[in-house]
Amino acid sequence: MKILLIYPYFLETRVHTAEDVRAVPLGVYYVASVLKENQYDVEILNWYNINTTPHKISEVLAEKKPDVIGFSILHANRWGGIEIARIAKQIDPRVTIVFGGIGATFLWSHFLTHFCEVDYVVIGEGEYTFLNLIKYLESDRSQAIETIKGIAFRHDGQAIRTRETEAIGCLDDLPVPAKYFSYQHLSLTRGCAGKCNFCGSPRFWGNNVRFHSVDYFVDQIERLYRKGSRFFYFSDDTFTVNRKRVVDICKRIIEKELDITWSAISRVDYVSTEILYWMRKAGCIQISYGVESGSEKIRNFLQKKITTAKIRKAFALTQSYGIMARAYFIYGCPQESRQTIDETIALIEDIKPLSAIFYILDIFPGTRLYEDFKHRLGVSDDIWLNRAEDIMYFETDPNLTREMILDFGQKLRLAFYERLTGFTEALQLIDRKDLYPLHADFYSRLAMTFDHGDYSRIDAIKHKESITEKLYRRSLTYYPNARAYLGFGILTQKRGAYRESGRILSQGLSQFPGDPQLNISMGVCLMNLGEYEQALSRFLGFQDVKEAVQFAAECYKALGIEDPNVA
Ligand code: SF4
């Protein structure tokens, strides 16, 4: 039996959350690994952008000839799933289509009622349910399908579901997907300590937070590390919910000398100096916190249950350990007004986040907000027959208009960007000698973000060049850092100050003599000073780097020597 697991495309192109939508959800890897452990032929297709080359959908499906296709449905990619399923059924009407994931779980009846392409829905935690369904499909089907817990299907034209499946008691019973696949999003936990009314996680995962063991989690990182991954997203709802487990994981990463960096998600009420210290030592470079709003009234409405004091403390502590604290804000909430937006701006000024993401409040199935919406407007799940990705709260509230919301969004983003340089200047890192190399790393990364990363493209951020230079300099006051020497050297070159640049790069090379980029930049500097012979000798040491070969060719030409690389 050939099984495809497809992560379908979204209707709209996302800008701010690109890294999230591009990645196949971790759950798909778990489902696939369970199938592999049971000797099934399964393949994962990341079709988050297949709609840019739509002819490939039928080409690939015709070639692979799947018997079953499982779709990973978030809310916003459901139309992608339906459209691909339609094509699959046209190619081979016998193919079985299964929808799963959070979007399918809360709209199982809707999908089965309105879309004949969908044969089954896996409800909730899917690994063993999907396996049981596959076993059923390839059997003689003498077993009553109703005995498979956690699925929904059509019976006599009606959508029906079976009994709820039990949550997996021991998460470590699941095979480590890294045995079979490479990926960057990992998770230690399932479930969340919070119960926010706009979030589907509490209902999807249940009331308790479940954990993988330290061994399982670190083994997964190590396997991926051995395959070449160096950066990870720990995508738990609240990674730090269990202090001891997190500290143990960090210590283990350090002991095993896994040279990785990673970002995590947490809540402001679940971090402490101890956790932050170990997280930073183990390679954490960013923590995202849901702050949501500066207005306590709105935070209370969202049932966020965090105080301003806790938010302030978490941001100050996180950034003092050289971890970028990212704030997620939601606007367009009930009772949003100029005043609540001003309160959010005041909070931004107060907590000085180095990164901030602003979302409009969406209404997702599976949340209390959605139940309230259906009740308020007297609508049913049929609302999702609209070819739209999501429902924004403000569209359902007569007190809010699109113009207001756009204006609020602009104000918030502008307020953040205009203050960002000041936030950066105000940074004060904790004075611990063992953290100095990491502080140098932190400042050089931040400088790079202003220099040629995300912040370099944002006009509202002023004085980018001067803050970049300050950050590179600060980095080097803590510890020699190759990235800082290189960035500072190139920045100086761009100003045409080649001698000064050469001096900075020489300092860097005295610390990191074999660093290719420092050597190549030094070569470029020497070329600009007319010292082609010396430049050439730099480039010749790095003939496996394309740039170095190109620069060497320029040197040969300037020196009037035949380039041995030209036939
Ligand atoms: S928004 Fe975050 S903290 Fe709140 S319930 Fe969802 S995952 Fe938990």
Image (cartoon, helix red, strand yellow):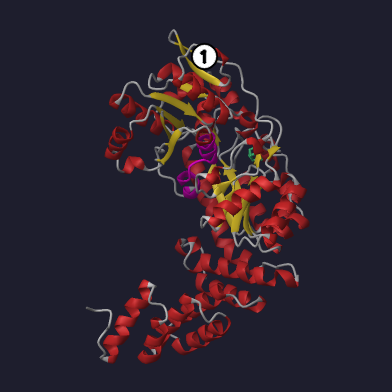
Return the x and y of residue 303 as percentages of the image width and height.
69, 35
Residue 521 image offset from top left, x and y in percent: 44, 80
**Residue at the image position 74 percent from the left and 54 percent from the top:** 275
Q: Quadrant of residue 195?
A: top right
Is residue 214 rendered to the left or right of residue 92? Answer: right
The answer to whether mark 1 is within 8 Å of ligand 1 is no
Label 1's element? helix
Percent coordinates x, y for residue 39 in the rendering: 49, 33
Residue 89 sits above or below residue 411 on the image: above
Q: Quadrant of ligand 1?
A: top right
Q: For residue 9, which quarter of the picture? A: top left
- Looking at the picture, how far across and down is residue 166, in whole percent? 65, 24
- Mark yes or no: residue 415 visible: no
The relative height of residue 164 versus residue 239 in the rendered view (above or below) is above
> Camera-side residue: 219 or 390?
219
Looking at the image, residue 529 lies above or below residue 379? below
Q: Is residue 327 left or right of residue 268?
A: left
Which region shows up in magenta? 18-34
The residue lying at 53 percent from left, 50 percent from top is 184
Is 455 covered by the magenta stretch? no
**Callout 1 amino acid:** Ile
Residue beneath disc 1: 145
Residue 23 within the segment the image draws in magenta: yes
